[in-house]
């Protein structure tokens, strides 16, 4: 899903919501309606980025994914205690190779303030008790709409049919969010956005789960290399993966 600030569902604002780093079943700042971003990255390089905004307007829109069998060791649980350290770990580990950078400057207090907002939830996928990915729900910006602000898997867990299950499960939790937050009205819309930086499968993954495109934007933006959870980590991961295939 695309890295950026959130927006309010309903009459669409310019959201900068969810980043997706899911698997092959399975969001970069966006301009508005094709306006070009003329600033340039290192060496003056820019790239064209297409951003798609998607939504569901009824729980019946959700299409479930195949459930992993018990032997897989895959489970999904909510992080019920706000933990800036854990959330920042998930953010950097999942988004390191797809240029998630907006929250890197956040302070501890900024993380805690966000995580303590009513209607914000983090659901984490585990494989054999190891964090494999997460989906973040933000219901704090609207009384009845929920944004999937971030979703994705750590690189080592992609391509293993975890992403589709996590997305379907997390979307279902967006639809029943009011049941966990007293005085909140039932959800009437779940929305997100993804972009062309998220790889060739992201848009199709959301469509498979029943999301529909309601807006598209195209913009030029500065090219910036993915930060990695630490310098050179993404290159090392690709090298190890290539060696395992030999």
Image (tube, helix red, strand yellow):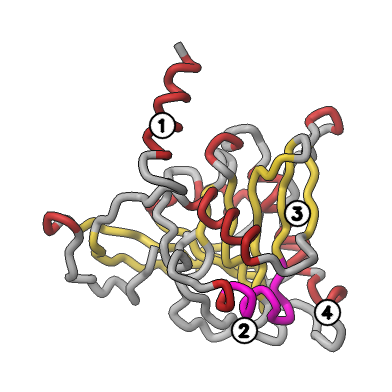
Disc 3 target residue:
169
- Residue 98 image offset from top left, x and y in percent: 42, 50
* Placement of the C terminus among the 4 image quadrants: top left
In the rendered image, the vertical position of residue 100 relative to residue 158, given as above or below = below
Q: Residue at x 77, y 40 (%)?
A: 129
Label 4, residues with CA under 10 Å away: few <14, some 14-19, many ≥20:
some
Q: Say whether disc 4 or disc 2 marks the residue closer to the N-terminus.
A: 2
Q: For residue 236, which numbered disc appears in the image?
A: 1
- The residues tagged by marks 4 and 1 sit, at their Cα atoms, a distance apart of 42 Å
Q: Which element is circle 4 on? A: loop
Q: For residue 141, which numbered disc appears in the image?
A: 2
Q: Is residue 8 left or right of residue 4?
A: right
* Label 3–label 4 contact, CB within 8 A: no
**Front disc: 4 or 1:** 1
Q: Name the one closer to the observer, 12 or 233.
A: 233
Q: Residue at x 43, y 21 (%)?
A: 242
> Where does the magenta region start and end?
111-121
Q: Say whether disc 3 or disc 2 marks the residue closer to the N-terminus.
A: 2
Q: Residue at x 39, y 54 (%)?
A: 99
> Which quarter of the figure has residue 66?
top right
Disc 4 target residue:
181
- Residue 238 image offset from top left, x and y in percent: 42, 30
In the rendered image, the vertical position of residue 224 relative to residue 200, given as above or below = below
In the rendered image, the vertical position of residue 223 relative to residue 70, given as above or below = below
**Front disc: 3 or 1:** 1
Q: Which element is circle 1 on? A: helix
Q: Name the one closer to the observer, 202 or 110.
A: 110
């Amino acid at each position: 899903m695309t890295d950026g600030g959130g927006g309010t569902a309903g009459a669409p604002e310019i959201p900068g919501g969810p980043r997706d780093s899911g698997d092959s079943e399975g969001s970069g700042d966006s301009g508005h309606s094709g306006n070009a971003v003329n600033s340039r990255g290192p060496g003056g390089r820019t790239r064209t980025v297409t951003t798609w905004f998607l939504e569901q307007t009824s729980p019946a829109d959700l299409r479930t994914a195949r459930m992993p069998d018990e032997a897989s060791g895959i489970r999904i649980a909510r992080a019920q205690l706000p933990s800036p350290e854990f959330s920042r770990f998930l953010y950097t580990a999942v988004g390191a190779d797809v240029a998630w950078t907006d929250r890197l400057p956040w302070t501890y207090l900024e993380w805690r303030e966000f995580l303590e907002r009513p209607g914000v939830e983090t659901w984490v996928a585990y494989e054999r008790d190891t964090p494999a990915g997460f989906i973040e729900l933000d219901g704090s910006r609207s009384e009845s709409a929920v944004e999937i602000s971030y979703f994705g898997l750590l690189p080592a867990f992609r391509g293993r049919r975890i992403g589709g299950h996590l997305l379907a499960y997390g979307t279902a939790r967006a639809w029943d969010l009011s049941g966990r937050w007293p005085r909140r009205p039932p959800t009437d819309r779940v929305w997100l956005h993804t972009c062309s930086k998220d790889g060739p499968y992201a848009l199709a993954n959301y469509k498979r789960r029943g999301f529909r495109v309601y807006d598209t934007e195209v913009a030029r933006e500065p090219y910036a290399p993915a930060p990695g959870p630490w310098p050179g980590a993404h290159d090392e991961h690709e090298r190890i993966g290539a060696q395992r295939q030999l």
